[in-house]
Image (tube, rainbow, N blue to C red):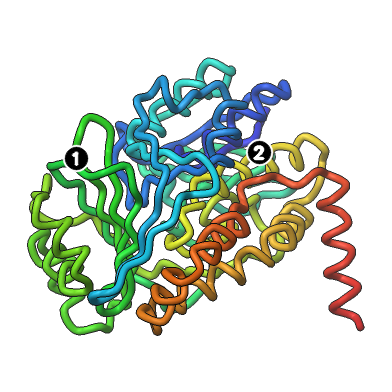
Amino acid sequence: MSRVVVVGGGPAGAATAIALARAGRPPLLLERDAAVSEKVCGEFLGADAARLLAGLGIELEALGAVPIRHAVLAAGRWQAEAALPFAAWGLPRATLDAALLCRAREAGAEVRLGAAVASAQEAGAGWQLRLGSGEVVEASRLVLATGKHDLRGLSRGSAGGALGLKLPLHGSLPATVALLSCRGGYAGLQPRPGGGANLCAALDPRTPGVAAAARSAEALMAHVARGSALAESLLAGLRSALGRPLAVAGVPYGFRHRGGGPFRVGDQAAVIPSFCGDGVAMALASGLAAAAAIDAGDPAARHHACWSAAVAGGMRLAGLCAMLHRRAPRLLVGAVSIAPVLLTTAALQTRLGAMPSRHRCRALVADSTTSGRS
């Protein structure tokens, strides 16, 4: 008999699998990579992510996560710093993903690594998946948790997008997340456990110098360093752990999925600008929301409408903050230096990893439907 199949073993897919297994519906989780690996991700985990992870049986301190208590913005010679209004941590994605997949197995989900899905199509009331090995898998419900990568035939349908780059670094940093303006976008820099740092950038691929930055660790560090005096100072004491950065193209920041199809979670459901550092929390929360919807027998369209309505306001604010940091970085940094409360307020208002209650979800959908008819 077919069962729920989750495609993707990142935070969204693992959270979905854990919740379904705990509800007595253990799914099959298919992850294309044969072993957990680094992903293009800022690695920032706020209090909402920590709370959701604790509910899934994962304590960040036990994994060695680095506490982060301050944020600093920089553009040119300008910089502004403020204490974060919540506890936050830094943790490599490979460490987090491995812990989540372990919890999924312990909960009763079947986790298959190295199982790439080549295609998926509707088959009657369910889905039929063809793996790269040629094996065919039947699914009663399909959960698409492939992150920033689309599955053939089930594209998000969003054109363009930013270039996401990630570069692990050797060296040491203070317990601060730095948001650094640079040509074509911005970068985030924060410490990693055991020393080292993570540099992650969201850049317009059409910007001069960005193509070279995507091919070379040295070029990426130089590109970011030219954007501010702070970036130049911080990066001067760090060295790359890789020859070239990890990259993913066409990241549709601001995207929110609407409609039916498979259940979409994580970046397949909504993509918050990485500037805000809430991507992992949103991935976890959307996975839990999808599991609850599947367990209740709700259709995918209702899940998507609920999630889109729940995160709409925060997504718009996140998009505005990212646009200001990209187009008028010195104005934004100057404003925060005068009134640090602007940064703390924006940080609080863009924490979208709090799954709304079932009744609240339905109310949001009803409100958005009524507004669309008026």
**Front-most of 188 and 4?**
188
| Quadrant where the N terminus is found in the figure | top right
Q: Nearer the viewer, residue 249 or 170?
A: 170
1 or 2: mark nearer the eye: 1
Q: In the displayed structure, does residue 351 sit left or right of residue 237?
A: right
- Marks 1 and 2, the one that precedes in the sequence: 1
Disc number for residue 196: 1
Q: Position of residue 113 (x, y in %)?
A: 38, 31
Quadrant housing residue 183? bottom left
Residue occupying the point 53% across, 72% down: 319
Q: CA distance from mark 1 to mark 2?
A: 32 Å
Q: Residue at x 70, y 45 (%)?
A: 355
Left or right, residue 128 beside residue 94: right
| Residue 365 in the figure: left or right of residue 118 | right
The dot on residue 288 is: 2
Q: Is residue 73 left or right of residue 268?
A: left
Q: Amino acid at mark 2?
A: Leu
* Residue visible at 21% across and 52% down in the picture: 167
Residue 100: numbered disc: none
Q: Residues within 10 Å of mark 1 (few under 14, many from 20)?
A: some
Q: Residue at x 11, y 59 (%)?
A: 217
Residue contact between numbered discs 1 and 2, judged by CB atoms under 8 Å:
no
Where does residue 341 sit, x and y in percent of width and height?
55, 62
Amino acid type, label 1: Gly
